[in-house]
């Protein structure tokens, strides 16, 4: 699937299939809007730029099962993403890694996550 369209609607998307293998090793997947898509892994995404979710669902009841808190710096084995937008999407087998500040933003954009009572949300 080409990312040239910049808008992907009503499709099942395996994020790993969108990686540009001719780009630099840590080049982010960027500049795509997904609408009403099923987004599949397995993959852990690492937002490095604008990243938004609206009315999306996740197949978990607690964000702690999919969110991996990381310190700033370089990380290996993650899919960097930037300037991605997800609207009315269903995420399956996708994890998200990022700073503690990302967690409440992630919680706010998903329909079926219960707000965490963990003390590390700030």
Image (cartoon, rainbow, N blue to C red):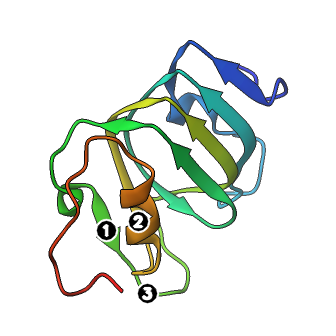
Q: Secondary structure at mark 3?
A: loop
Q: Is residue 30 above or below residue 3?
A: below
Residue hosting label 3:
71
Is residue 77 shown to the viewer in this render?
A: no
Q: 10 Å neighbourhood of mark 3: few (<14), some, or many (≥20)?
A: few
Q: Nearer the viewer, residue 102 or 81?
A: 102
Q: Is residue 12 above or below residue 113?
A: above
Residue hosting label 1:
68
Q: Nearer the viewer, residue 54 or 37?
A: 54
Q: Residue furthest top?
A: 10
- Tag 2 near tag 1, CB within 8 Å: yes
Residue 97's tag is 2
Distance Cα–Cα, label 1 vs label 3:
10 Å
Displayed quadrant of residue 81: bottom right
Image coordinates of residue 59 in percent, x first then y, are: 23, 36
Residue name at image x 52 percent, y 34 percent: 15
Q: Secondary structure at mark 1?
A: strand
Image coordinates of residue 97 in percent, x first then y, are: 41, 65
Query: In this image, 37 relative to 19: left or right?
Result: left
Is residue 74 shown to the viewer in this render?
A: yes
Residue name at image x 57 percent, y 62 percent: 47
- Tag 1 near tag 3, CB within 8 Å: no
Q: Nearer the viewer, residue 36 or 40?
A: 36
Distance Cα–Cα, label 2 vs label 3:
10 Å
Q: 10 Å neighbourhood of mark 1: few (<14), some, or many (≥20)?
A: some
Distance Cα–Cα, label 2 vs label 1:
4 Å
Quarter of the image for the C terminus: give it: bottom left
Q: Secondary structure at mark 2?
A: strand
Sequence-earlier tag: 2 or 1 = 1
Sequence-earlier tag: 2 or 3 = 3
């Amino acid at each position: 699937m080409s990312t040239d369209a910049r808008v992907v609607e009503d499709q099942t998307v395996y994020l790993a299939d969108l990686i540009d293998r001719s780009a630099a090793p840590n080049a982010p997947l960027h500049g795509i809007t997904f609408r009403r898509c099923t987004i599949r892994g397995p993959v852990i995404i690492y937002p490095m730029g604008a990243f938004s979710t609206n009315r999306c669902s996740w197949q978990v009841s607690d964000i702690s099962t999919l969110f991996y808190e990381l310190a700033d710096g370089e990380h290996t084995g993650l899919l960097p993403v930037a300037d991605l937008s997800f609207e009315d999407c269903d995420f399956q087998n996708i994890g998200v890694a990022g700073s503690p500040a990302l967690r409440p933003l992630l919680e706010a954009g998903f329909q079926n996550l219960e707000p965490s009572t963990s003390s590390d949300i700030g």
